[in-house]
Image (cartoon, helix red, strand yellow):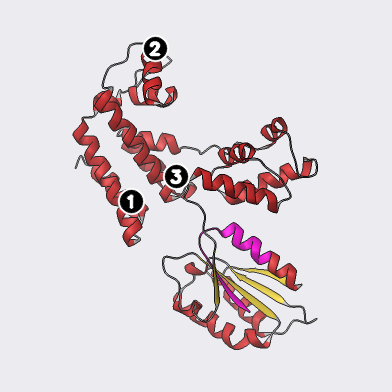
């Protein structure tokens, strides 16, 4: 049998593949054909019968990264050899368009919720808990998600640890809080504020590292969210702050956290530091222009599949040149 697993939830796809292998009593073989040294071993294994007749389940990971030549050859061997041998093939594919070569096979979708859809991630965390033998209420699932972020593998790893010390799949809030590791997003807020603060050496110094650690959509969402907050502050609270009470009052009326507001207003709790007041540095028109460009990046990605990363580099380059 040949199955195609579509979507970006690689953790669930791999977990399901292992479940199928166990159900079939097959040996699970993880294959990365996008790596040059993987093609020959795969070809040999699929064409050579197992010495003891054990069935195999080949999991072809990240198939969208495989060259067209290797993809064609892989399907030639799958089509001719797989029906003759006790093997199953699962193709992991995350691409904008499904490969026409997939058409003869059964396809299943495994998609992750969007990074900013917290309610869907909490539901997913509850489901991952059940898969790991844990009964989590929504509050506990929220805690786990907030600590791990939108990463099913991190969530599952933490849940395995929690399951090991749980009492028949249940755990007290205090113990859960002590056990779950806080995977705080590194550098993302600093990166966003370095863009808003026009600190372009810092932006380009951390650009590739940030994009390797976070999803493109999450970075763009956070940047739009922060720029919208800046736009509101420029329109309704454009002032110079002289004391902490000013921050507290603005926080009450806007719902923005005081640490975030302090970055917008350049308010330092250390009086010896002089920071830039970004709310005074911007005019409403300039913030509007930035927002318009960010919406265009988002639209180009959603409607045409254009790379957020490439368009973001062009956007940052224009900003740094004062265009």
- Check disc 1: other Cα within 10 Å, few if <14, some if 14-19, many if 20+: many
Location of the C terminus by quadrant is top left
Rendered view: 290 above or below 308: above
User: Farthest residue toward the front?
Assistant: 137
In terms of image quadrants, where is residue 147?
top right
User: What residue is drawn where x is 51% and y is 62%?
Assistant: 7
Residue picked out by circle 3: 210
Mark 1 vs 3, N-terminal side: 3
User: Could you say which is closer to the camera, residue 169 or residue 66?
Assistant: 169
Q: Residue at x 75, y 81 (%)?
A: 50
Q: Residue at x 51, y 39 (%)?
A: 185
Q: Nearer the viewer, mark 3 or mark 2?
A: 2
Disc with the residue nearer the chain's start (3 vs 2): 3
Q: Which residues are magenta?
A: 1-18
Marks 1/3 in contact by CB < 8 Å: the verdict is no
Question: In the image, residue 97 lies at what x, y percent?
Answer: 42, 69
Could you say whether the residue bearing mark 2 is in a helix, strand or loop?
helix
Element carrying mark 3: helix
Residue 145 in percent (x, y) is at 58, 41
**Distance from Cα at disc 2 to Cα at disc 1:** 37 Å
* The N terminus, quarter of image: bottom right
- Of badges 1 and 3, nearer the viewer stands 1
| Residue of label 1 | 298
Q: Position of residue 238 (x, y in %)?
A: 26, 22
Q: How much space separates mark 3 and mark 2, taking CA atoms?
A: 34 Å
> Does residue 199 appear in the picture of this structure?
no
Disc number placed over residue 265 in the picture, else none: none
* Residue carrying label 2: 245
Estimate the x, y position of residue 23 in percent, counting from the top left: 74, 69
Q: Is residue 254 left or right of residue 140?
A: left
Q: Which residue does the image show at 31% across and 53% down from the upper left?
A: 299
């Amino acid at each position: 049998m040949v199955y195609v697993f579509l979507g970006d939830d690689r953790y669930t796809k791999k977990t399901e593949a292992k479940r199928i292998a166990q159900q079939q009593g097959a040996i699970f073989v993880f294959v990365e054909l996008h790596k040059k040294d993987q093609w020959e071993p795969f070809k040999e294994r699929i064409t050579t019968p197992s010495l003891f007749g054990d069935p195999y389940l080949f999991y072809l990971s990240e198939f969208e990264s495989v060259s067209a030549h290797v993809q064609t050859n892989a399907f030639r061997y799958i089509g001719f050899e797989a029906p003759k041998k006790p093997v199953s093939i699962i193709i992991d594919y995350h691409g904008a368009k499904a490969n026409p070569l997939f058409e003869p096979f059964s396809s299943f979708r495994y998609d992750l919720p969007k990074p900013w859809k917290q309610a869907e991630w909490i539901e997913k965390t509850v489901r991952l808990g059940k898969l790991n033998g844990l009964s989590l209420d929504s509050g506990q699932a929220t805690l786990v998600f907030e600590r791990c972020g939108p990463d099913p593998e991190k969530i599952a790893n933490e849940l395995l640890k929690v399951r090991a010390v749980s009492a028949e799949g249940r755990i007290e809030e205090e113990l859960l809080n002590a056990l779950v590791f806080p995977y705080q997003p590194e550098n993302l807020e600093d990166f966003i504020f370095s863009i808003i603060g026009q600190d372009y050496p810092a932006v380009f110094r951390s650009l590739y590292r940030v994009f390797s650690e976070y999803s493109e959509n999450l970075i763009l969402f956070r940047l739009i969210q922060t720029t919208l907050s800046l736009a509101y502050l420029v329109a309704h609270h454009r002032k110079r702050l002289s004391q902490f009470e000013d921050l507290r009052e603005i926080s009450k009326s806007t719902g923005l956290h005081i640490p975030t507001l302090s970055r917008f207003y350049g308010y330092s709790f250390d009086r010896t530091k002089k920071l830039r007041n970004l709310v005074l540095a911007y005019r409403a028109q300039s913030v509007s222009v930035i927002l318009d460009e960010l919406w265009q990046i988002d639209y180009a990605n959603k409607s045409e599949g254009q790379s957020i990363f490439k368009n973001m580099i062009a956007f940052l380059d224009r900003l740094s040149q004062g265009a």
